Image (cartoon, grey):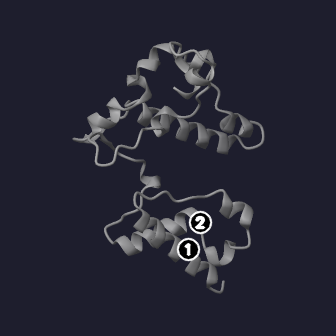
């Protein structure tokens, strides 16, 4: 509405201005506190009255994979396989293992969280390696991250990582 007001075009979406929206649609779901799956889906851009005015242009080339083709073919193959897996997850092409849309992750990407404390320690080790040794390698460490579902888990993982940085190698 702001652009329509600024451009004095009250009946033209975005006031007649070209708007470019980019990103991964599977990672851009709206936040509806306490909302059901149906409520979240109904709040997406594709359900908006503006969707009729959207033209989708897709990028088909994975530059991260292509960057490694000549210098590190094994890494390029690994990235291509991961890219293919993520695409299948995002498009619902993987076999679901239970009700609710769950899919089975590759074994190498899983850590047993039967023991939450041990599981977090294993996760930190898998993602960052031995932080007491690698803490001076800021380049390597800065390219890694752990995503968590709750702020409490984020705080706990951050505290554990900071404690490891203080350890002697």
**Mark earlier in primary sequence (2, 1):** 2
Question: Which of the 4 quarters of the picture holds residue 15?
Answer: top right
Q: How crowded is mark 1: few (under 14 residues within 10 Å), some or many (20 or more)?
A: some
Name the spot of residue 69 as percent of width and height, x first: 72, 36
Give the vertical position of 87 relative to 169 (above or below).
above
Q: Between 36 and 139, which is closer to the camera in this rendering?
A: 36
* Residue in the picture at 51% in, 76% down: 160
Furthest toward the bottom, the residue is 168
Residue at the image position 61 percent from the left and 85 percent from the top: 167
Q: Do the residues labelled 2 and 1 touch (CB within 8 Å)?
A: yes
| Position above or below: 83 against 55 | below
Percent x, y of residue 64: 67, 38
The residue drawn where x is 46% and y is 53% is 109
Q: Tell me residue 148's x, y (percent).
A: 44, 59
Q: Which of 169 and 36 is in front in this view?
A: 36
Q: Mark 1 points at which residue?
A: 161
| Apparent side of residue 42 relative to residue 58 in the rendered image (left or right) | left
The relative height of residue 120 versus residue 17 in the rendered view (above or below) is below
The reply, left or right, for residue 42 in relation to residue 59 is: left
Q: In which quarter of the image is the C terminus?
A: bottom right
Q: Residue at x 57, y 15 (%)?
A: 9
Element on which disc 1 rests: helix
Which residue of the protein is positioned furthest toward the left in this rendering?
Answer: 99
x then y, percent, for residue 71: 78, 42
Residue matched to label 2: 128
Q: Dot 2 surroundings within 10 Å: few (below 14), some, or many (20 or more)?
A: some
Nearest to viewer (mark 2 / mark 1): 1
Q: In which quarter of the image is residue 116?
A: bottom left
């Amino acid at each position: 509405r702001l652009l329509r007001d600024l451009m004095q075009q009250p009946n033209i979406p975005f006031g007649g201005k070209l708007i470019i929206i980019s990103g991964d649609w599977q990672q851009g779901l709206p936040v509806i506190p306490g909302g059901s799956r149906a409520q979240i889906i109904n709040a997406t851009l594709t359900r908006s009255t503006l969707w009729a005015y959207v033209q989708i242009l897709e990028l088909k080339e994975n530059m991260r994979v292509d960057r490694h083709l000549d210098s590190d073919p094994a890494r390029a193959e690994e990235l291509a396989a991961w890219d293919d897996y993520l695409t299948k997850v995002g498009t619902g092409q993987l076999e679901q293992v239970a009700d609710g849309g769950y899919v089975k992750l590759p074994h190498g990407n899983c850590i047993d969280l039967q023991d939450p404390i041990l599981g977090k320690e294993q996760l930190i080790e898998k993602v960052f390696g031995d932080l007491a040794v690698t803490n001076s390698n800021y380049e390597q460490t800065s390219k890694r991250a752990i995503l968590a579902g709750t702020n409490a888990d984020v705080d706990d993982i951050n505290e554990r990582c900071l404690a490891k940085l203080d350890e002697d190698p």
